[in-house]
C-alpha cells in the first residue's frame, strides 16, 4: 500500500468509527453489487459505483500489488479468479483490501498487527471446531 492510497483512504473515509460494519464501508465506496429483483428471484449485477471513484480506482490498483506480497490475499484472489473470472476477482480482492484498511484505521494498528490478530483468530476457530 502506497502513501497516496493510504492518504486517500483516510481522507475519503473520514472517521472510521462512523461505520458500524465492513459492509457499510463497502457500500459507501460503491463496491457492492446492484440488485435487480422481481418477486422471489434475486439478481445481483455489477458494482454500484455510487461511492468515490478515485478511492475505488486506488484500491483496485493497490490490490494487484498486495496480491503479490500477501499470501492470504493471493490465495483469496486465485480462488475467486477460478470461480468468477478476472474482473470479479479483482473487485472482490479490492473490497477485502479496503475493509482491511478500514479495520487498521479503526483499531489504530499496522499491517503486521492485523496479520497477527488474524492468525490468532484462525487458531481460536480451529480449536473451537475440534471441541
Image (cartoon, grey):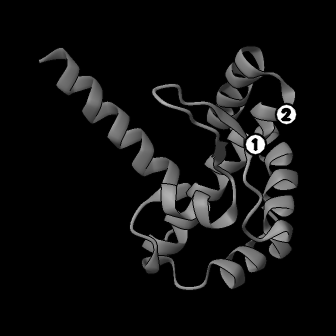
Q: Which mark is residue 87?
A: 2
- 36 sits to left or right of 78: left
C-alpha distance separating marks 1 and 2: 6 Å
67 above or below 94?
A: above
In which quadrant will I find the N terminus?
bottom right
Between 30 and 21, the one lying in front of the other is 30
Q: Which mark is residue 15?
A: none
91 above or below 42?
A: below
Between 127 and 103, the one lying in front of the other is 103
The answer to whether residue 25 is visible is yes
Residue 115 position, x and y percent, is 51, 48
Q: Quadrant of residue 46?
A: top right
Q: Are marks 1 and 2 in contact (CB under 8 Å)?
A: yes
- Which residue occupies the extreme front position in the image? 39
Q: Quadrant of residue 85?
A: top right
Residue 109 position, x and y percent, is 50, 69
Residue 120 position, x and y percent, is 35, 42
In which quadrant will I find the C terminus?
top left
Residue 112 position, x and y percent, is 56, 56
- 33 sits to left or right of 39: right
Q: Residues within 10 Å of mark 2 (few under 14, many from 20)?
A: few
Circle 2: element type: helix
Residue drawn at x 45%, y 80% as measured from the top left: 18
Q: Which mark is residue 91?
A: 1
Residue drawn at x 60%, y 84% as measured from the top left: 14
The answer to whether residue 108 is visible is no
8 above or below 110?
A: below
- 107 sits to left or right of 123: right
31 above or below 70?
A: below
Residue drawn at x 63%, y 77% as measured from the top left: 13
Circle 1: element type: helix
Amino acid at each position: 500500500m502506497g502513501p497516496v492510497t493510504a492518504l486517500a483512504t483516510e481522507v475519503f473515509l473520514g472517521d472510521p468509527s462512523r461505520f458500524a460494519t465492513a459492509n457499510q464501508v463497502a457500500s459507501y465506496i460503491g463496491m457492492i453489487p446492484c440488485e435487480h429483483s422481481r418477486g422471489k428471484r434475486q439478481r445481483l449485477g455489477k458494482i454500484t459505483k455510487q461511492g468515490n471513484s478515485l478511492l475505488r480506482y486506488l484500491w483496485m490498483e493497490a490490490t494487484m500489488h498486495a496480491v503479490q506480497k500477501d499470501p492470504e490475499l493471493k490465495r483469496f484472489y486465485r480462488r475467486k479468479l477460478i470461480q468468477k473470472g478476472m474482473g470479479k476477482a479483482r473487485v472482490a480482492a479490492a473490497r477485502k483490501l479496503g475493509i482491511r484498511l478500514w479495520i487498521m484505521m479503526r483499531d489504530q494498528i499496522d499491517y503486521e498487527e492485523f496479520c497477527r490478530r488474524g492468525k490468532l483468530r484462525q487458531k481460536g476457530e480451529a480449536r473451537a471446531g475440534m471441541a
